[in-house]
Image (cartoon, coloured by chain):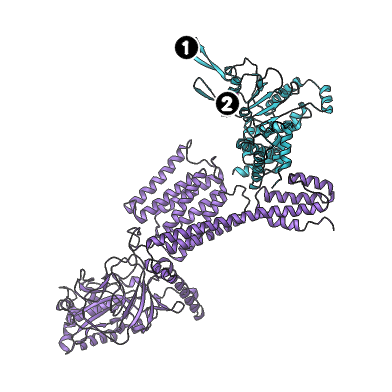
Chain colours: A purple, B cyan
Amino acid sequence: MTEKQLGVRELYWLTGGISMSILPHTLHNPQWFIVLPFILIAWRLTCAIYHWPLPGPGHAVLKVIKLLTIAAGILGIYGYYHTLFGRDAGTTLLLLLAGSKVLESHIDRDFYVTTFLGFFIIITNFFYSQSIVTAVFMLLTLLVIIAGLITFNDPGKRQLPTARVVLGGQMILQALPMMLVLFLLFPRINGPLWGMPEDAVRGRMGVDDVLTPGSLSRLIQSNEVAFRVEFISGQPDNTALYWRGPVLTYTDGRAWRRRLNNLDPPAAIQFSGEPIEYIITLEPTDKRWLYVLEMPTATPDKAQLTEAYQVVTREAVKDRWRYLLRSYPDYRLETASWRELRRGLQLPRGYHPKTVALGREWANQADRPIDIINRALRWFNEEEFHYTLSPPLVPGDLIDGFLFNTRQGFCEHYAAAFAVLMRAAGIPARIVTGYQGGTYNPVGDYHIVYQRNAHAWAEVWLGDKGWVRVDPTSAVSPARVERGIESALPEAALDVPVVFSRNQFTRTLWLSLRNAWDNVNNRWNQWVISYGPQRQDNFLNRIGLTRHNVFLLVILMICLVLFLLTALALGLLKQYRAEKDAARELYNRFCRKLSRAGVKRLCHEGPLDFARRAGRKLHPFANTIDDITRLYIDVRYASQTEKLPQLKKRISGFRLHG
Amino acid sequence: MSTSRKEILLPQIRQEIDGIIEAARMIILGKEHAIRLALACLFARGHLLIEDLPGVGKTTLSHVLANILGLGFQRIQFTSDLLPADILGVSVYNRDTGTFTFHPGPIFTQITLADEINRATPRTQSALLEAMEEQQVTVEGETRQLPQPFFVIATQNPSNQVGTFPLPESQLDRFMMRIKLGFPDTVAERELLMGRDRRTMLKEVKAVITPERLLAIQRLCDEVHASTAILDYLQDLLEYSRNSREFSHGLSPRAGLAILHAARAWALMEGHQQVLPEDIQAILPSVISHRLNGLQEDERRPEELAQHLIIQVPIP
């Protein structure tokens, strides 16, 4: 095979496709070296358009520039990530090399290599985002790359660019059944056979197990989904939607932390009232705990309850996790070990002297712990305390400064101050972090809990009632718990754009659109992204394959793939035969028409010879006969089957008399 | 790229081909079809065998072609005492330098006229035929490439004449075409008699194209589209020659390839974008007449057999 040179037209498609596949990487990797692939690609394209020389033999300077650019890129990547492996560094390196491959593409072999590199880059985008938007954009990229392949293999360049894109789309559609078979039947394996690289979910936003002033309020501006909840039975009031996360017991005067390596059995609990059943779809957090509605009866697999009733997991949650739970909003955490109670009284020495003094003073004046609690809540409510997203910087001691000077704070401030007050008054107290509330999505009938629903509250130990939840924030801003964060802090509701927030109608429109979109996303997550062993099992059971194993699946998959391929091949063959026969049939019809006029085609007579002879005999029709013959030759001998309908029309319309 | 180049080049090449034929027609009168066939053979990278009586213009035709195409030309007169070294060349000891120097034979040129090839011994014949097939010459263990394009025109007297070694069938197969010039018709002959001396005219002939263009035309021939419909037709022809029992043996696969290549070249010369049944029919007699033999009792000449084949096989 001779080497085929790359033309400008093919390069447009190739560089377009590769650029599109690289583009999303700029969003999450905005370092200077991400620009280099684009520069290399633009360089190649410019050279092709203006017929400038490319780096190569005879152009040593250009070659040196190219090598320096690539070396700078590699050094930059290494300098930033301190490695060339892993998800981020590896992908960025691949992009750089893809750019340089585009620059050195001259002949058909380079074209194919670069094209397949493009397919590979498309896959790397899914390391970062598996959303619908990414999938759709990557599908478009795939279409452009395939259209490029078609352009390269369309020697006559007879097709319009749009026709090439349409053909590419048809080819993708033809691959759809095969894709479905592979997607549905490819054995899904539990555990990381080939997992995401280590650094895939690092740096996610979310509730942490270290609480410092400001650690939650920075989440408030985030529209990211923390998890989605479908209630199966019973739907609690918004005020009861406390999603329990890390329980923090230890404070060093600045931060609150949870107790690690907690192996004690969970505290005894008594449930009453009606249970609530629900399914949580948790977005990956890279943390080792789950969120549950207070209080669950059991935990999902691979998770367990700690003594403080926190659900911890053995491994960090790196994939979307779906779990079914049953919780009772009415519960009594009855017993606690004396160690847990002692931990609930811990205060760092030398911190918050004024707060501790106040707590002790209240303790002296009250008989029962409940009176102290109520006094504290009343104090928060009646004094000039403000609930705000952007509290001023507290000078000196964090708790003292907040309680006695600034008096502006977010839920973490109130929860922490309250816990310190209680501990000072001799009541065991701890902080629970997690989420509160949620937004109901009527389109998909589920609740969305966003990162901005992050919340912190307190639990205190009352001898006769066990651990009781006290939310000091509700004393300051009852709306926060009753109507959600959006009404308590309008600035938190960033998601309605200004254009839509002017009047009620557009606002509602925006919200319903957003609900619909989130519903689509939710379905996508559950049916496409989270199609794991469990879902596959369900699907196979539903189609009647109740007893199956990996071996059977592989056999079934291979059979179906072979069946599809055979069907496709037969279909193509049939279509080809039909077209071939159709052209001949039409021509025979044409010859019969001429034969009735007295010109009979000899069986060995070629179309041109016959047309010439017939044209001489039927002189007035010579041009028509000539045109039809030419069309027939195009269809039959130049394989331009697209002209078949035209031929059919001409022959049907061919009349020798009249 | 290559095909858009083809689209641009096609009209231009047609013009050039017409120019070549026009120039050749001026000298070889009344033999346009033979000229066209010879050119098609050349474009299809085949070698040509001209079989006819002496004095009908075989040599003139090959010389004209060489001059018009701007190619180097050598003529080798085959005689019964001609040795392979006379064709291929020989290494001669050089006393001054003390080494052997290779003196290339007359075959090291672009158009070689092997005149009266059937007068030489089979050994000498096969030396030429091997060079034709391999496009290279191996003398004393060293292989030398022949110049490109490389084209052999061999002439042959009808084998019933005295003192000839007829080429065996296997050797004949190496020629893509065998053509006959025949006597000119009366009009052409009168013109020939009235006109100037052909030898002087031959010297005045100027090259119409360059060897590079010729190579480009040869490459374009390979790209002429042959649809499955035309391949069906070709296979029907081959099939008929093998199964009909009218021929002593059918056409070989090599003959099939030769037909296809020659038909492509013919289509290009006719200005067709694709091979048509007419193209195959036009070249078929010349390509198969030296490969096809009738049965013992069959008195028909090979050309008639070829024509019979064309008429018997319907175009699918």
Residue that appears at 43% across and 57% down: A123
Q: Residue furthest bottom?
A: A367
Q: Split into 4 quadrants, where in the image is the N terminus of chain A?
A: top right
Q: Split into 4 quadrants, where in the image is the C terminus of chain A?
A: bottom right
The quarter of the picture where residue A169 lies is bottom right
For residue B98, the mark is: 1
Residue A52, magenta (yes or no): no
In this rendering, the answer to whether A569 lies above or below A444 is: above
Q: Subunit of mark 1?
A: B
Q: Is residue A258 left or right of residue B202?
A: left
The amino acid type, in three-letter code, at marker 2 is: Glu
In this rendering, the answer to whether A540 lies above or below B131 is: below
- Asked if one can make out residue A369 in the rendered structure from this viewpoint, the answer is yes
A544, B69: nearer the viewer: A544
Where residue B207 appears, x then y in whole percent?
69, 28
Circle 1 crowding by C-alpha within 10 Å: few under 14, some 14–19, many from 20: few
Q: CA distance from mark 1 to mark 2?
A: 31 Å
Q: Which residues are magenta?
A: B128-135
For residue A228, the mark is: none
Q: Is residue A537 left or right of residue A593?
A: left
Q: Subunit of mark 2?
A: B
Q: SS for tag 2?
A: helix
Where residue A121 appears, x then y in whole percent?
44, 54
Q: To which residue does mark 2 refer? A: B130
Residue that appears at 59% across and 44% down: B1
